[in-house]
Image (cartoon, rainbow, N blue to C red):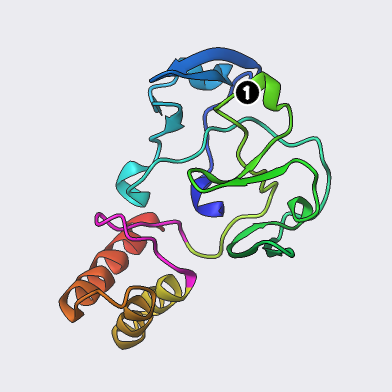
């Protein structure tokens, strides 16, 4: 889920809750986000050209201390294929929904629908967070292959992730990712 947090927000300011609503959804957003040019429908557009999607708002650091190295969640009912901070793995505040994925339920009553994202602390991904205009999710295997410049491996990984993808779409994805990675460094 780090893909919803990076690139990190560079806007400074207070993060106390400010009432916010959108399409009947109610809650609050951080004060620094309430007046920010990147706030849109309760999410952040700070890197739209890079990630081709919205990012989570920056609610400030989580009060739960611990390791923020990425790890997978595995329980009796759930086995994730996305990474979350290690400290969140056994946290009572970790929530998951089909619509928003993993979120933090800490102070849920204060934030309402616009809940906290997961706190990645000082950890940052080895590769820039980039996306595709097609909105197809970019797996780490695809991203690593594209970053190494290996078109064949990128196509193989992309088609493994999306069996319905054409060879042409996979080649286009490789070219787009290589270009995005160049811009992001």
SS of the residue under disc 1: helix
Q: Which residue lies furthest to the left in this view?
A: 168
| The residue stretch that appears in magenta | 128-140
Is residue 134 on the magenta stretch? yes
**Residue assigned mark 1:** 111
Relative placement, left or right, of 181 versus 105 is: left
Q: Which residue lies furthest to the right in this view?
A: 65
**Residue 84 location (% of width, % of height):** 65, 56
Give the residue drawn at x 30%, y 46%: 49
**Residue 67 location (% of width, % of height):** 79, 55
Looking at the image, is 184 positioned above or below residue 22? below
Relative placement, left or right, of 16 versus 35 is: right
**Residue 131 location (% of width, % of height):** 35, 57
Q: Which residue lies furthest to the top in this view?
A: 19
Of 141 and 112, the residue lying toward us: 112
Our reading of the magenta stretch's main secondary structure is loop
Of 175 and 57, the residue lying toward us: 57
Q: In which quarter of the image is the C terminus?
A: bottom left
Give the residue drawn at x 60%, y 39%: 117
Give the residue drawn at x 45%, y 27%: 42
Is residue 149 on the magenta stretch? no
Give the residue drawn at x 36%, y 63%: 181
């Amino acid at each position: 889920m780090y893909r919803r947090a990076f690139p990190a927000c560079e806007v400074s300011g207070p993060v106390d809750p400010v009432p916010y609503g959108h399409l009947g959804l109610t809650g609050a957003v951080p004060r620094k986000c309430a007046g920010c040019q990147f706030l849109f429908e309760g999410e952040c557009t700070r890197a739209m050209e890079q990630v081709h999607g919205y990012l989570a708002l920056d609610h400030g650091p989580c009060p739960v201390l611990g390791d923020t190295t990425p790890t997978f969640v595995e329980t009796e009912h759930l086995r994730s294929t996305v990474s979350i901070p290690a400290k969140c793995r056994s946290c009572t505040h970790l929530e998951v929904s089909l619509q928003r994925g993993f979120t933090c339920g800490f102070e849920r009553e204060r934030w309402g629908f616009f809940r906290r994202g997961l706190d990645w602390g000082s950890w940052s991904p080895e590769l820039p967070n980039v996306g595709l205009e097609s909105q197809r999710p970019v797996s780490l295997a695809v991203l690593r292959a594209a970053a190494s410049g290996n078109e064949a491996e990128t196509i193989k990984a992309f088609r493994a992730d999306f069996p319905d993808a054409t060879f042409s779409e996979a080649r286009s994805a490789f070219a787009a990712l290589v270009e995005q990675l160049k811009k992001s460094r």
